[in-house]
Image: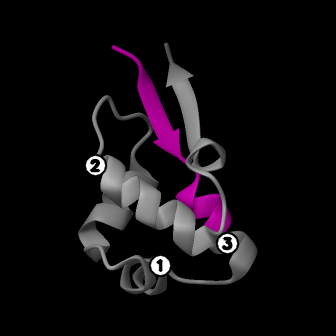
């Protein structure tokens, strides 16, 4: 099973936002955003949360996700 990393930290920094602001805008728990942002690689994620995060950043899911292990 592969692993992915989400580019949340870089996107938050680029936009001058906080992860709490992102969580509020996406309508998902801050703990989810923080976990996804700080994880070096995840095998499973909530696709709905990823979709909402991509919408907040106005990017595609593919732009949000980085494959770290195939």
- In this view, 27 is above or below 67: below
Q: CA distance from mark 3 to mark 1?
A: 11 Å
Q: Residue at 38% x, 86% y: name it.
A: 24
* In this rendering, position of residue 30 left or right of residue 37: left
Query: Disc 1 marks which residue?
Result: 22
Q: Residue at 54% x, 61% y: name it.
A: 54
Q: Point out the residue furthest to the right here.
A: 14
* In this rendering, position of residue 63 left or right of residue 42: right
Query: Disc 3 marks which residue?
Result: 13
Residue 19 lies, in percent from the top left, at 46, 76
Q: In the rendered image, which quarter contains the N terminus?
A: top left
* Camera-nearest label, 2 or 3: 2
Asked if the magenta segment contains residue 6, the reply would be yes
Q: Residue at 59% x, 52% y: name it.
A: 7
**Mark 3 nearby-residue class (10 Å; few <14, some 14–19, many ≥20):** few
Residue 26 lies, in percent from the top left, at 41, 76
Q: Residue at 35% x, 35% y: name it.
A: 42
Residue toward you, 69 or 52: 52
Find the magenta span and give its range.
1-11
Residue 27 lies, in percent from the top left, at 32, 79
Q: Secondary structure at mark 3?
A: helix
Asked if the magenta segment contains residue 15, the reply would be no
Query: Disc 2 marks which residue?
Result: 46
Q: Secondary structure at mark 1?
A: helix
**Mark 2 nearby-residue class (10 Å; few <14, some 14–19, many ≥20):** few
């Amino acid at each position: 099973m592969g692993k992915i990393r989400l580019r949340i930290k870089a996107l938050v920094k680029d936009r001058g936002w906080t992860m709490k602001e992102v969580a509020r805008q996406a309508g998902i728990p801050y703990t989810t955003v923080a976990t996804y942002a700080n994880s070096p690689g995840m095998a499973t994620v909530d696709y709905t949360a990823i979709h909402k995060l991509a919408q907040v950043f106005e990017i595609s899911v593919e732009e949000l996700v980085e494959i770290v292990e195939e």
